[in-house]
Image (tube, grey):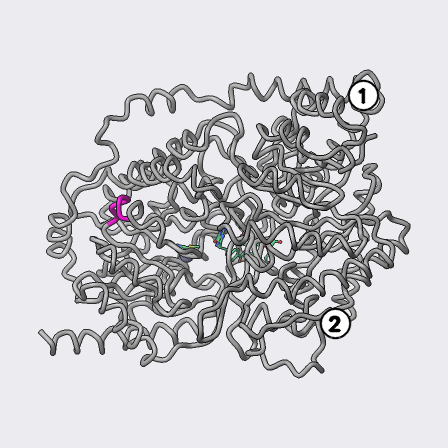
Amino acid sequence: MIHTHILGFPRIGAQRELKFALEAHWRGELDRPALEAIGRDLRARHWALQRDAGLDCVSVGDFAFYDHVAGHIQLLGCEPPRFGFSGREDELERHFTLARGVGHPALEMTKWFDTNYHYLVPEFLPETRFRLASGRLFAEVAEARALGHRVKVTLLGPLSFLWLGKERGGQPFDRLALLEHLLPVYGQILQRLKAEGAEWVQVDEPILGLDLPGPWRAAFEAAYIALASAGARLMLATYFSPLADQLQLACRLPVDGLHIDAVRAPDEVLRVADWLPAHKQLSVGIIDGRNIWRCDPDRALATLKPLRERRDTLWLAPSCSLLHVPVSLAGEAGAHSGIDSELSHWLAFATEKLDELALLKRALTDGEDSVRNELAIARQHLADRRASPRVSNPAVAARLRSLGPDADRRAAPFPQRQARQRARFGLPPLPTTTIGSFPQTREIRATRAAHKRGEIGGGAYQAAMEAEITLAVRKQEALGLDVLVHGEAERNDMVEYFGERLDGYAFSANGWVQSYGSRCVKPPIIFGDVSRPRPMTVAWTCFAQSLTPRPMKGMLTGPVTLLQWSFVRDDQPRADTALQIALAIRDEVADLEQAGIGIIQIDEPAIREGLPLRRAGWRDYLAWASRAFRIAASAVGDDTQIHTHMCYSEFNDILPEIAAMDADVITIETSRSGMELLGAFGEFRYPNEIGPGVYDIHSPRVPDTGEMVALLHKARRVIPAINLWVNPDCGLKTRGWPETEAALRNMVAAAQEVRRQVAAEA
Ligand SMILES: Nc1nc2c(c(=O)[nH]1)N[C@@H](CNc1ccc(C(=O)N[C@@H](CCC(=O)N[C@@H](CCC(=O)N[C@@H](CCC(=O)O)C(=O)O)C(=O)O)C(=O)O)cc1)CN2
Ligand code: MET
Ligand SMILES: [Zn+2]
């Protein structure tokens, strides 16, 4: 027997209904019952899609108004006490307070494994205890049952939940110690889910794909023995990474089924099929849940057929939740999509992946003959893709082959470059700058949307964006910033903008993927060899520079981030694609320099998140990733100053590689950790200039000057003042102008105060 299911469906809605409803609710324009109704409607539609595609059960528990981890914190009754909830507040409003920090610092956000999705980080204190504190999940089960669905609930597992959180409070302690308090509550949840008609509970333990410390690994067995006693049927779900030395552990745990990621770990499938006891269900994540390519049914069937011979029942699923792919190709039929009909045949978004599952099931159940036509069509599209002249560009391959061994090296070492740059720019000590973007106001977005719909022409659009750039330049001059930026008004997104301008890239009209809360991105699709037909940013940057005598920083997205935040081709190694993008950016850097732009920033916020989840892959990745950056950055003279920017991550364990990127200046997010991160930069004696972020841009709160002065003094303890820059944590596009100007005014004052103190000490 073949059983089909998914690990989760995108919740944002095909037309981003959830985003618009949330933002209207936050503006006070949509009341709570109306918001709830939109949530209910989205769930119902997504379940109907699953049933109509012929799946054997629907996925319940994958919905959240902001974030599913925050929902889980509420289910387990462990909202941090620092929020001071009295217990009388409405659960949904508490959800938004946790996420958005109204009146309190919000929960920290961080990346969900190696994806571009951000979850809210649970906070644990030694005295944290748990209780079943929310009825939401059970209500959703009832909702699905009332609609006649067979229900499988998805629930984040106890060990992954603890792992993904962090310890807070004064004294150090080990959050693993909280497991004994957590398990009884999981027991209650599982019992109740079973009693209320959930046929299966999928317990997600993606951390089984990480290199776990011994005590964490050892905790699994006892934990799952405890959960087994609840009597619910459990499907343990792993994804994103090979199980490796935890494979036997995963097979041994007392659960009723195991899901594995056959896309990221194809070599483990047969071993799991051998190790997993016959009475347990094996769920094979055969369809790529992280990418948008049409599944090759022959390859999939070749993997599945030997399993079919070994096991009576086989479950088929996407490799992971479909949260990470857009909802449907149906949204690409209109004129604004860069996905033409040929390309669309190469692709499958979430909804199309449901049909792919159904096709594989029928091929295995009734024989390939029963789906002869569907298979023939799929084979034809795959063959077309393989043979398409659009995919390969011999000139790109030739250029890569001809790259000399020094293509990734600046001419002079850093100290000589630093001297030349100091002489050229004459900046004060602790120069001030920003990370690139200024507020993307509703007017900017509306103007772009009108331009896209053809309501305003190219000239008017350009004039409107130039007006925004002018405004940003004037404001920066008035604030007294030293190195200016143009503000990125003309960019829809730092990745999509470049994807739209590079050959080998396609962009969708509606391929939205949730990034966090109501914020979405439209990852462009790399389908062929990448090259740059013409300059992408030079005219805007030169326009901005023409407005001011101060240095205007050119602003580019780096090759690793362009790779990591796009859907990438699956027919060549990521490293090769990164190198192609690096050459395109290298050309842009050279053109900016040629046009007289002396300072160029190449953003690489995704470099840390691209690290393989297992350490075994780190060396190789870091070598090609830092080389790709250097290829992009090294075609310039010694007196051109290259900046890079990184955020969202812990950099401590990759500092040597960051230093090896050899940017003249790096700006990094540090304020939220109180400069904690800088300790490592100091210890490692990071050699080049560095701008540790002095304020958090994720909140509208305006930091005062004193607090930024204190952070700068903290930074001075580990970085020589001569190498220090002053800047926010990241770009300001999600902020409004009033708080942006107030915060930057205080930031410039902080820099001036520290400069005076440095001068006085000298
Ligand atoms: N790719 C990527 N990944 C990233 C980041 C990033 O900047 N880019 N940063 C981090 C995540 N941070 C993020 C911060 C903000 C947004 C964000 O604001 N997204 C916007 C969409 C941005 C965009 O593409 N805007 C387009 C289209 C906007 C749009 O929806 N237009 C409406 C009309 C809008 C109007 O009239 O007001 C329409 O077309 O219907 C534009 O500016 O052109 C949103 O969700 O609202 C996303 C991620 C990590 N990962
Ligand atoms: C996520 S990193 C953002 C860098 C970009 N230059 C900006 O300021 O928005
Ligand atoms: Zn950033």
Q: Give the residue at x 42% y 55%.
A: 649
Q: Residues within 10 Å of mark 2 (few under 14, many from 20)?
A: some
Q: Residues within 10 Å of mark 1 (few under 14, many from 20)?
A: some
Q: Give the residue at x 32% y 21%.
A: 401
Ligand 3 sits in which quadrant? bottom left
Q: Residue 598 versus residue 189: which sits nearer the camera? A: 189
73 lies left or right of 440? right
Label 1 near ligand 1 (CB < 8 Å): no
278 lies left or right of 427? right
The answer to whether residue 291 shows anywhere in this view is yes
Quick check: 402 above or below 527?
A: above
Q: Earlier in the sequence, mark 2 or mark 1?
A: 2
- Rendering coords of residue 367 (x, y %): 82, 19
Residue that badge 2 annotates: 32
Q: Give the residue at x 45% y 44%.
A: 610
Magenta residues (range): 659-663
The reply to whether discs 2 and 1 touch (Cβ–Cβ < 8 Å) is no
Magenta: main secondary structure equals loop
Residue 129, quarter of the rendered image: bottom right
Q: Give the residue at x 46% y 61%.
A: 733
The answer to whether residue 442 shows anywhere in this view is no
Q: Residue 164 versus residue 295: which sits nearer the camera? A: 164
Type of amino acid at the residue the image marks with label 1: Val
Type of amino acid at the residue the image marks with label 2: Arg
Quick check: 92 above or below 456?
A: below
- Rendering coords of residue 559 (x, y %): 39, 40
Residue that badge 1 annotates: 371
496 lies left or right of 74? left
- Rendering coords of residue 17 (x, y %): 70, 56
Q: Secondary structure at mark 2?
A: helix
